[in-house]
Every structure is written in structure tokens, then in C-alpha cells.
Image (cartoon, rainbow, N blue to C red):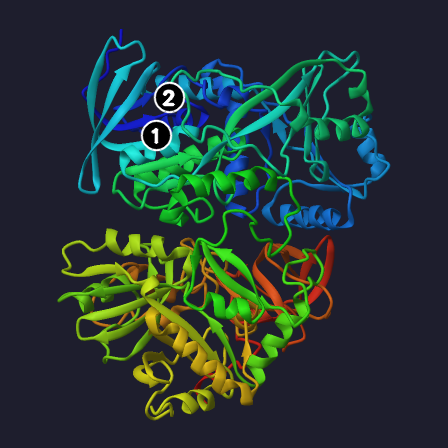
Amino acid sequence: MVDLPQKARVVIIGGGVIGCSVAYHLVKKGWKDVVLLERKQLTSGTTWHAAGLIAQLRATANMTKLARYSQELYGALEEETGVATGFKRNGSITVALTEERHEEILRQAAMARAFGVEVEEISNERVKELYPHVNLEDVKGAVYLPLDGQGDPANIALALAKGARQGGARIQERVKVTEIAKTGRTVTGVDWVADDGSASGHIECDMVVNCAGMWGHEVGRMAGVNVPLHACEHFYIVTENIDGLSQLPVLRVPDECAYYKEDAGKILLGAFEPNAKPWAMEGIPDSFEFDQLPEDFDHFEPILEQAVNRVPMLAEAGIHTFFNGPESFTPDDAYHLGLAPEMDNVWVAAGFNSIGIQSAGGAGQALAEWMDTGEKPFDLGDVDISRMQPFQGNKQYLFERSKETLGLLYADHFPYRQKATARGVRRSPFHHHLKDAGAVFGELAGWERANWFANEGQERQYHYSWKRQNWFENSAAEHRAIRENVGMYDMSSFGKIRVEGPDAEAFMNYIGGGDYSCPVGKIVYTQFLNTTGGIEADVTVTRLSECAYLVVTPAATRLADQTWMRRHQGAFNVVITDVTAGEGTLAIMGPNARKLLQAVSPNDFSNEANPFGTAQEIEIGMGLARAHRVTYVGELGWEIYMSSDMAGHVFETLHAAGQDMGLKLCGMHMMDSCRIEKGYRHFGHDITCEDHVVDAGLGFAVKVDKGCDFIGREAVIKRKETGPEARLLQFKLTEAEPLLFHNEPILRDGKTVGYLSSGNYGHTLGAAVGLGYVPCAGEKATDVLASTYEIDICGTRVRAEASLKPMYDPKSERVKV
């Protein structure tokens, strides 16, 4: 008998480990009227067949924090609920079979130390002690995390469900959500029907949480939100009992795409193969419940052949189970969490890319806190659902991309690695011009972006490495062109959001920290802040007219930034429109940028007519454009905006005029190396919603005395009074050869105090450069700079110079010449 309430504060759709965790953590927050609906039985989708690996280390500090919380929670659940989770800390070993992989795991070990995770770089002899059954003949090195663990996936979910019930949550199995009612941007309730058809009804609710796992895409569409994910077949085998087999750490051999888990005297061998098999393109069968997919031994055989060589005892062990089951994967291998941008009360926790068990505790806790307070508990940009672009919900796109994303879990995680599948969806108006000129493209938010330009006769593709990659000298030449002459690069992918209406000025002054009561043509660099002074967006805003502004944002955050603006629009009479695709944008940068523009335009680009931080309408060639005098590379320059229909003409005009001047086409790698020399911040790395704008060294861009209130104003005033709790420093290695990327530990006077938020090579400064926060509450700037600094690279400490001012052109004289 199904007896569900007619009203609820929240309805959670999906009873896997994620949905159970969200319900558990909401009742822990004191929420009442929490209802969870599961179409079949709890765990019957993918949770029940998960491998149950519970690691601590993830790619970022906050994802690691969530994974570590999961471990702590699972260790305590049995005492709280009486349900055994099977959690144990048996450790994990990762072995490298190549020198490149060895450097990767050594960098990961250094990162683990920065994140406070216990880690050991161990010898082959030590590997053999910990895992006697492994063949080490070609192993180059290994890393051991002694506190990694494993558990029983289904029982972890059932323990969370019992804890949720004990807190008052209503969990109903065998009830399917058939429709989600909406009014405008608000969900008002859900329709449900019992699995056997014996009952149906409607629950009015304040919020919905989509925890539907591989059904998340379908449920998202019912709610009017985009949840890009696709199911793939995931394979593993379980051996018969092996005599004498005792507890072992989890063994990962990513170069062979394999992991080994000992459990109750058996070995589970699983794989993340490079060419995955997407499943259920036409939809998941309604009857799916604890189902397995057909065996495909031919697909798994190459993994098994390598495994028998790696762990020879498998040759004699019988196979008890050959398992093939579906799991959901997202376009970027990061799960989806948070408030969906299309609606105001639809939350998402789905698409966990085979790490659902280790992530569920932390993800449920973070989402519950976000739902409870209305603000993120800390930076969740890696997994925030608003990072997904609308087109990424396209089924064909998801089918093609999912072939790759499963295997990327164990692929070499090289810096600058580009996705190979589902490419070419978004192209700038200059794409074919750049391609013809030798561009090698990367992809961001679906945009094909020229990252570097190959020389004539040079192979137009990446050769990945942890050392200097094959494009290093190409990018260095582009860097020098920007510093010494003039370069041109495509910025069309950057988000362009138009804000217009009678209240445009008042709205902009409320949403942003800058002063937007400025003349038409003025460009304001500033941040959108949250109530704690954290940075929600890093933008430039140009006043186009008395009632219109153009907000320029990073390509990856356009949707998130526009959503932030819309959610704070309130009663302001404005229209907020994405106009990114309507204009092409070319950056002309370098000491000779003015000379090039004067050659193609009759307009005046002098300091008197067009000073830094202003825009003007111009003629260019036979077309029209708008010239913004700003820079992200630290040189004299302009960003030229033109309507997409004139973009080809403008490019050809500039390119032709630049031939006699040595104009060089440049890519995004150049832009990043130049900006880090100048100390310019990169949103998502150097600055996030949990980084206070004063600590980030950007207090100058926030005008607390502009005559009106704005979001975050009180937090900025307070921090300016008390002083920063941390300072974002620029570091330059004293050795020319090592490379920096991000997450390398920072040592201050021999003690680890943080990690680099970003890094790249400074071709003008002659060494790798990084940015990173150093805690300094109560200290003066001179005290911070008086210390000795080192950066930990693969376990080797490298001395670094530190500065609060940009090491390149600290007075910004070059940009205003």
C-alpha cells in the first residue's frame, strides 16, 4: 500500500547511494517533510554493483575534502544505524609502468601532501611486501595511500537510508515519478504512480532534487533542466575463492586500465578501458532493476590478458562472475551538483562517473548545506551543474563523448590534454582562417579555440608529456611576439552578456563591486561578490549607452555568471541577454598594436582619444567595429568586437596589414603564459567563490564608497579593516627547467602552507611562474615576503622568488603607453 503525503518540503528522485545521502544530510540539518521516491528498490540502478573503492585523493582540494568526509561518515554509520557498511581502511597502491606515469603519480603524491592526505612514495620492494602477488618487472615506481579504503556499496546506501528514516524522512520504493509540474522557473510538484499501477498521486513541494543516476538526463528534461550524462557499460570479473588470500590494499595499474580489489578471499578485477561502450541510446528499459548487461568477453579480454601477467595467480583462479553493468558518465568526467541554472528550485546530484560511493557522503553533505543556507559551503566549481552548456544535453553528443570519458579515468592525466571525441560543435567566425594558418585547436565549453600555431611542415597535434610538450617553442615565439612586436588572437569564445533597461545602472551597481555610474565608453574591471566577499565572477563591464552594458566573462562561466545575475535581478527593470555568438572578437596586443590599428582604421587610438579602460566605435577596413582598450596579457592592446557577419572581413584586413609588421597569430597557451607573468588572476583557479576579494589582491576593483549598497559590501569593508587572512603571491622558480601547472605544494620556511592555484612558463621571466595563497592572518606584507619559499615538484623542493606585485611590468607602464 502506497501512502504518500500530498505536500513535502523537498522530493528527492532516486534511491541510490546519492539520493539516500542527500536525504540523510537534509534531516541532519533539521529538515522536515523530506520525501525520497525510488522507481524500483533502493540501490537497484548502479549502486548495487559498484566496486566500492573509497579513495581520499581527488583532483582538487575541495573534492578531496568531500571524499575524506565520505570515509569518516561511512566509518561511523554502523554505530549510528546498526547497518554494517563493510568500510575498512586497507590502503591503496598505484604503480606506474612508464616514466611519464611515474611523474604523474609523484606529482599526485606532492598534491596529496598539500591537501593533508597521508601518502608514501614507495619502492618496488615495499610494493611486494604490501602486495606479494604482483609482478613488478616493468614497474617504474609506486605510491601508497595507507588510509584509502573500501566498503559495501549497497549497505552504505541502506545505512544512509535508515539514518534518513530515523531523522523523519519518508522513503518510498516502487514509485515512479511520471511528470514534474512547473510554473515559470519554479517546480510546484511531482506526479507519481506505483510500480504495479495500484496507486497514483501528486506531491506539492518546494524543491526537487534529481538523484536519478543514469536516469538523470530523462528526469532533468521532465523538470526543464539540462543534466548531461550517458550510461556506459562497465566491466569487471570476480574470481572464485583463492586459498590463503588475505586482506590486501587496492591495487591500481592505470597503464593497463585495471584495478584489483581483494574482498572475502576473492579478487575483483575491473577496468576503465580507453574505448568504452555507450549503452541505452534509445532509453533505459522501464523494467530495469538489479539488471546485468550481456557479457562481452572479447571487449574485456585484452584487460584480462594483461592482468594475468600483472597478477599471475589469476591464471589459476576460476572466474566466479563476469559482470557487465551500466554506469553514468558526464562530458568532462566530473559529477553534477547544485542548483540547476534553468530553474530556481531544482537541484541535481547525478552523473558520478564510477566514483559515486567515495563521493556520495561528501556530495550529499555539501548539497544539503547549500540547500539549507542558499549559498555554496565552499567552491564547488569543478562539479557545479551550471558549468554545463545547453548543447551538451544533445543525445548524439553525449553518445560520442561517453565513448572517451570512461577511459579517461585511468588515462595519463597530462597537462593541456584535450578531449578527442564530440568536437567541432562551436566554432568562432574566424575558425577556418585560423585553421588555414596552422592553428591547433583545444576545446572549452564546446568552443574550438586556437591554442597554438604549428610551423609550416610541423605536425598539427599535441604530443603530451609532463615535460616540455611539442608546442612549447611555438608558444614561446607567440609570447615573444606579444611582448616585443604585435600579435593577434581570437577571443570570440569569451562570454558576452548584454544588460539593458531603465534600471541597468542601478542593477550593475548592486550586482558588482565596481562603480558603473560612469561615462558611456568606460570599461570597468571588477568582480561579482557573494555575501562573504568571495568572488562569484571576474568580469569586465563596458558601458555601451545610458541604459546598456556589456559584461564580458570567461567562456567556461558564461552560463553560471548569467544565472547569478538573473537570480539577483529582483525588481530591477533590466533584460539580461547572452550575445556571445553575435560578435566575433580579436585581440590585437603588443608594443606595435596601435601602429597596426592605425593602418586599417581612420579613428584615433591615442592615449588622449582612447585611454586605457575605454571603448570607442570605429571603422575598420570597409566594416564597423568597437575597440576596447583592455588587456589580459599585460601589453598595449585592444579587443576588437565586430558583428559576426563582418568578422571575416575584419580578420582579413588586419592580417593583411600586419604582414609587413611581422604580425603573429597567437593562441590561448600564449595568453595564459603572458597573464601569469603579469600576475593576472584566472577565475576558477586563482579566484573562486571562497576566495575573499581582498585576500586575492583585488580590493582595488571594489568600490565600497560608490554611494550605494552592493552584494558583499559589508564583507569587503570588514576585511579591509582586519587585513587579509591570506595573500595571493606570485612565485618564480630560481631554476629554468622545471615546469609548474597547479596544485604544487608551497613551502614557507620549510613548512607546507598551501599550494599553487595556477602555473605556467614565463618565457620573458625565464622560468616557470605560479600563483598561490599563503595564510598570513595578522602579518604585514613585509613579513610574508621576508620568508624563504620553495615549491614541491614531484617530491623535489625548488627554490622560488615571491612577490605581491607582478614580476613583469609591476607599474603597468606598458599597457598605458
* Residue 242, picture quadrant: top right
Image coordinates of residue 575 in percent, x first then y, are 19, 60
Badge 2 marks a residue whose secondary structure is helix
Q: Mark 1 or mark 2: which comes first in sequence?
A: 1
Badge 1 marks a residue whose secondary structure is helix
Q: Residue at x 46, y 73 (%)?
A: 632
In this rendering, the answer to whether 625 lies above or below 98 is below
Count the numbered circles shown: 2
Can you say which quadrant of the picture contains the N terminus? top left
Image coordinates of residue 807 in percent, x first then y, are 57, 77
Instruction: Evaluate if marks 1 and 2 touch, with contact meaning CB atoms under 8 Å apart.
Output: yes
Image coordinates of residue 665 in percent, x first then y, are 54, 75
695 lies left or right of 495: right
Residues 291 and 504: in front is 291
> Can the viewer see residue 589 in this picture?
yes
Marks 1 and 2, Cα distance to the nearest angstrom? 8 Å
* Residue 736, picture quadrant: bottom right
In this rendering, the answer to whether 730 lies above or below 87 is below
Amino acid residing under circle 1: Leu
- Other-residue count near label 1 (Cα within 10 Å), few / some / many at <14 / 14–19 / ≥20: many
Please, which residue is most extreme toward the top here? 1
> Can the viewer see residue 680 in this picture?
no
In this rendering, the answer to whether 463 lies above or below 702 is above
Q: Name the residue carrying label 1.
A: 26
Residues 120 and 410: in front is 410
